[in-house]
Image (spheres, helix red, strand yellow):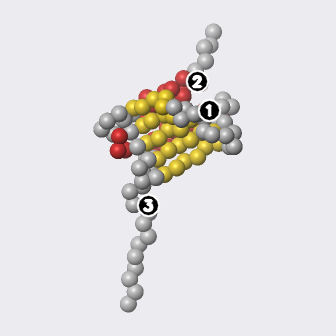
Amino acid sequence: MSNIVPLPLGKAGQVGFERIELSRIMDLYGRMVAAGEWRDYAMDFDKDAASFSAFRRAAERPQMRVEKRPSLRGRQGMWTLFGEVGQVLKRGHELPGVLAVIERRLLKIVE
């Protein structure tokens, strides 16, 4: 007799983005592409964190990286925004507040 073993849907314990989180990130990415700021992106999923990186050019280091680290949920917040050289730009418990730093670049004064 043979045993049927179902394949796992993903790696056990792997951190990922929820649909609404990824939608919010991709919305910002699309607006930055339209503004000519970004041209490429990468996503990385690990057992500790999930990250989204945006690039001006594919050969460069990421201009921005947003990271979701659920283990920090109770402390300083699970969301972290990193700048181009790896400096922490913003930490928080909510994704919209963390992404607001990047969204401010899109605002222009209209007279």
Kind of residue at badge 2: Arg
| Image: 83 above or below 5 | above
Q: What residue is at 35 percent from the left and 44 percent from the top?
A: 71
Give the number of marks. Answer: 3
Residue 11 circle label = 3
Distance in Å between CA atoms under marks 3 and 2: 36 Å
Q: What residue is at 51 percent from the left and 31 percent from the top?
A: 87
Using residue 12 as the reference point, say whether residue 43 is left or right of it: right
Q: Is residue 108 visible?
A: yes
**Callouts 1 and 2 close, C-beta under 8 Å:** yes
Mark 1 or mark 3, whichever is nearer to me: 3
Classify 10 Å Cα crowding around label 3: few (below 14), some (14-19), many (20 and above): few
Question: Please, what secondary structure does the residue beneath circle 1 have?
Answer: helix
Q: Quadrant of residue 97?
A: top left
Question: Please, what secondary structure does the residue beneath circle 2 have?
Answer: helix
| Image: 6 above or below 95 | below
Of mark 1 and mark 2, the one earlier in the sequence is: 1
Question: Please, what secondary structure does the residue beneath circle 3 have?
Answer: loop
Classify 10 Å Cα crowding around label 1: few (below 14), some (14-19), many (20 and above): some
* Residue that carries the numbered disc 2 in the rendered image: 105
Q: Residue 81 location, x and y as percent?
A: 49, 34
Of mark 3 and mark 2, the one earlier in the sequence is: 3
Residue 90 circle label = none
Distance in Å between CA atoms under marks 1 and 2: 9 Å
Q: Residue 16 location, x and y as percent?
A: 44, 50
Of mark 1 and mark 3, the one earlier in the sequence is: 3
* Residue that carries the numbered disc 1 in the rendered image: 32
Q: Residue furthest top?
A: 111
Kind of residue at badge 1: Met
Kind of residue at badge 3: Lys
